[in-house]
Image (spheres, rainbow, N blue to C red):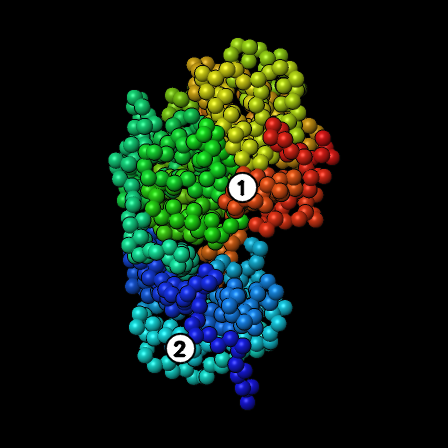
Amino acid sequence: MPPKPTPPKLEPDILLAKSSTPGAADWQGAYHLVGHTAAVLKSVTSLVDCLGDRLIEQFGLTCELKTLRATARLAAYLHDWGKANDHFQMVVRNDLKSLDQQYRRNPLKHPQLIRHEIASMLLAWEFREWLQQCPDADFMVALAAAGGHHLKLGGKQGKDTSELGEVREGTGDTCLYWYIRHPYFRKLIRYGVRTLGLPNQIQLPRAILERWEVGEIKRDKRQAVLDAFADWEPDLALLAVMKALLIAGDSIGSASAQVPLDIHQWIGAELSKTLTITDLQNVIDARRGNHPLRQFQIDLKEKSTRVTMARAGCGTGKTLGAYNWAQKHAIGRKLFFCYPTTGTSTEGFLDYVQDEVESVLLHSRSEVDLELARTGEEVDNGDETVNETDQKLDSFKAWGAKMSICTVDTVLGLLQCNRRPMYCFPAIANAAFVFDEVHCYDDALFGALLRFLKVVKAPILLMSASFLPTQVEAIRSAVGEPVEIIHGPKDLEEKPRYRFHEVDKPDWRRVQQELANGGKVLWVCNQVNTAIAVYEHAKSLGLNALLYHSRFRYGDRVKHHRAVVDGFKPDAPPVLAVATQVAEMSLDLSATLLVTQIADPAGLIQRLGRLNRRYCGHALDAMFYPEDPKMIGFPYSQDELDAGWALVRSFSGEVNQAQLATWLEQLQVQSQPKDHFVLLDGKWRTYPAALREAGYTVTALLEQDQATVSTLKSSDLPRYTVPLPTEDIKGWQRHKKGYLIAPAEQWGYSSELGAFALKKR
């Protein structure tokens, strides 16, 4: 005989879905379980109805729209069932000081036995015979989507655990009590009957107990669901769409609890904002001025296929051509213009679409960038966020924007269940896409692009200064239909732009001569410490010098970036800009002399793209000097440096962009693009994983800034973040928002030089 149910301490009159404001008079609308479920179901239904057949078309789904709709609605109905237990109900009442302490639960002291969305899966499984009778719905897909709607299913810290939720230690309890006979849960059942067409009578082959012992949950309940998933072969595209729909729907359904909102009307209004020919013509006309479009830019529109590759050098007008391409492929859609870094995405926003069309800049530090840009300052590289609420609110901007200028992570991160793209999914589901600077993608990012091309059937433009033959083959194989390659203008790419000079050490006299003649010099180093040393020597010589690298506080880095961009404007005085690899993509400038340490071939070509970018009529000098032998491997290996020297030594006399692209495309580069992604290959698992290959830095706060940042709201924290090397970070404390804190004894800082290792200075 099973033990008799022991009544829980709390016997609530209402089952809540979330905490209300302490002292509130009642718990109305979306705060209670039925109200919140109804809000999320309404939002998911509205998403499917507004996007309609575009969802089927965009993701190549084989199911009918009625199946997609019914399954999405069932997932929304189930997603919070697991809140009908005593642990959760006590937690959401914890701030109610008017309630006796024995009826409240502090989750920091006594965590819930299991997360509520995992509990939803386990409880729904008990009702499976009834739920499987939901007309036109796929119960297993709905169950997996419901369990993953907080992105914590089957993985932890970006790694697969294949665990169906954690049964937590330290809860202080040996059991979980279900309120399945509570009037509000019965109300939830009746809502399912009325709204989803579920049978009026629940007939199950077993009784569902109200009390679950911890051992039973660990041993039996979770295993039963895992066994069902073991041999499950779902429609992976349908499952992926379902997960994203529910996460997006839950985010806006939850927001309606705080803000009075007609969900259906708001979603319809925001998603219906799509591009027109006039919108794009405004962008084109504002940028080209009185100059006609080049034939290359016209071809991007007239000769393009659904997936098109634009292979053109720096300064040839690819971006303007992309907006002309969009006049054929993005009308009636939204447009995501994806750059590799936040620096390039902010520049693209400011230079092209701001004030020309309803648009939004999307990356984790965009508010800092735009605020400083409006005051004559600006931008950066890197995308890391620690505040989920801020991400949701920021992502809602994309729902109504006709254009989203963003980092590539905002779109391809969808495949790895990254939060921002999951929240942006309704806009992504009705968009065309431009991916710029594809040649700089690492194997992980390029693999994600290939999988995106295979799954997503939207219009897509890929742009790069060069494509390796292996990349072209992989792209065409992924697309599975004809892909047109549009080449850049020969008259520009074959103009003599560069003269190469190999030197043993930098020629400071040549730099001083260039500045004396009114020129603009760009000096690129491979390490931050090297760049600081060059800058300090330039200042000692009395030169007008600027320093730009990644190791500044973000707010300071934005200012340094803007100072360099402004310093290279034609009417500005002669200047020397000393930079690191950040110059390779995020700086749109045209130098008259380039001085650079040797690097890998792709990096050198990117650096050369800043020299004579706005063609002056003849070739200009590029000086290459060796890496410090002590620094080989940081970040370039000896093989990469040897390949860089091979590029430089392959040319004599005057060199053009076409020659560099041809040389690079003849390299026998071995790559292994990533081919496993959580959203598509994890089946029932749903958790965020890394999109890019692991880097050598971690985003941190400085100990000396703690007094300041302690007074800031979370959205202002990015101003004070600094990327620092991952070496010697063991034992660092962590800020409450997740950032590591660099000890003042290890890292010094100045707004002029940035962060520097004290033991090395």
Q: Nearer the viewer, residue 51 or 704?
A: 704
Residue 297 x %, y %: 33, 30
Mark 1 or mark 2: whose residue is earlier in sequence: 2
Indicate the quadrant where residue 543 lies: top right
Indicate the quadrant where residue 248 lies: bottom left
Residue at image point 38% right, 65% down: 28
Residue 422 x %, y %: 43, 52
For the question of whether residue 662 can be seen, the reply is: no
Amino acid bearing label 1: Pro
In terms of secondary structure, where does tag 2 sit? helix
Tell me the quadrant of the picture where the N terminus can be found.
Answer: bottom right
Residue at image point 44% right, 28% down: 313
Residue at image point 45% right, 60% down: 21
Amino acid bearing label 2: Pro
Residue 575 x %, y %: 54, 18
Q: Exactly how many numbered labels are in the figure?
A: 2
Indicate the quadrant where residue 528 lies: top right
In terms of secondary structure, where does tag 1 sit? helix
Residue 555 x %, y %: 54, 35
| Closer mark to the observer between disc 1 and disc 2 | 2
Indicate which disc residue 718 carries.
1
